[in-house]
Amino acid sequence: MTLQRTSNLSADTAGARGTRRRPLLWGVLIGWVSGGAAVGIGSMVVMQSGLFDIRASTPHLFVVGWLTHHTMIRSVQVRAASDSGRRFMPEQIARGFRLYDSHCFACHGGPGLSRERWVDGLTPTAPYLLDMARQWSPSQLHLIVADGIKMTGMPAWKFTLADGEIWDVVRFVRAMHGMSPARYLQMRATAASGGESALGVANYAHSRAPHPQ
Ligand code: HEC
């Protein structure tokens, strides 16, 4: 008898707890749905009203700039492959330099050397790439260069460069860390004077050799 009363009591308590929890669940659900609807309607209003300033000549609001930049960083970190077992060869630096100087320099400049003036008109603008070796792993850089960055002026290079060439550029970009302006200009002079074969560039553009892993 005593036992039965105890178990009835605990069943009652559990039932009471269940009915108390239900309004809470409904509250959370209604909160989510109405919150989602408010965000949706808000976005439509901003879009339809032309409130968002799309002109590249005005900078992003701080919060928009921060959000888009961090979205880019997380997206690259999550998507990039692992670097385990990756090997680079010394001659990749010279090959990568040549590609960088002709395809990237206009937007990104070099050590102590300014990019083209028209790049100031991009929003977001193209940053100098002198500390990329500290900020990104090789695979993360490969992803950025190969696939580009949406809603910025950064193109996806995999449509015009072979995968081996993209790895060469990645190698060079990493080598720019701490490089002096004199060294950059010296590499440019060497490439221009046909010294490329000495640097291991001969016939590379046509051979499209696969990237050594
Ligand atoms: C037309 C201009 C343009 C050209 C050409 C260009 N880029 Fe970019 N690049 C950009 C812009 C703009 C960004 C900034 C994107 C951002 O802020 O999210 C960028 C971002 C990058 C980043 C990421 C920098 C960071 O914020 O950490 C790397 C790395 C990069 N570019 C490498 C290259 C390489 C290598 C090439 C040549 C193969 C190249 N880019 C050519 C415009 C350009």
Image (tube, rainbow, N blue to C red):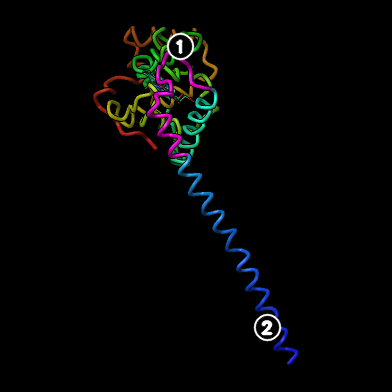
In the displayed structure, 34 sits above or below 180; it is below
Q: Position of residue 77 (x, y in %)?
A: 49, 37
Specify which label sits upstream in the sequence, 1 or 2.
2
Please tell me how crowded label 1 is: few (under 14), some (14-19), or many (20+) other residues with Cα within 10 Å.
some
Residue drawn at (32%, 32%), measured in percent from left and top?
163
Which residue is most to the left? 206
Instruction: Give the residues drawn in magenta, as a range.
Output: 39-61
Residue named by callout 2: 8
User: Left or right: where does residue 22 sit relative to residue 124?
Assistant: right
Magenta-span inclusion, residue 49: yes
* Residue 139 figure quarter: top left
Q: Where is residue 172 in the image (x, y as percent from the top left)?
A: 43, 22
Which quadrant holds the N terminus? bottom right
Name the one closer to the observer, 173 or 18: 18
Q: Do the residues labelled 1 and 2 touch (CB within 8 Å)?
A: no
Name the one closer to the observer, 27 or 172: 27
Helix, strand, or loop for circle 2? helix
Of tags 1 and 2, the one toward the viewer is: 2
Which residue is most to the right? 2
Amino acid bearing label 2: Asn
Q: Position of residue 96 (x, y in %)?
A: 38, 21
In the displayed structure, 132 sits above or below 212; it is above
In the displayed structure, 15 sits above or below 211; it is below
C-alpha gap between disc 1 and disc 2: 84 Å
Residue named by callout 1: 184
Residue drawn at (54%, 23%), measured in percent from left and top?
62
Please tell me how crowded label 2 is: few (under 14), some (14-19), or many (20+) other residues with Cα within 10 Å.
few
Magenta-span inclusion, residue 158: no
**In the image, the residue with mark 1 has its CB under 8 Å from the nearest atom of ligand 1:** no
* Residue 195 figure quarter: top left
Residue drawn at (49%, 33%), measured in percent from left and top?
73
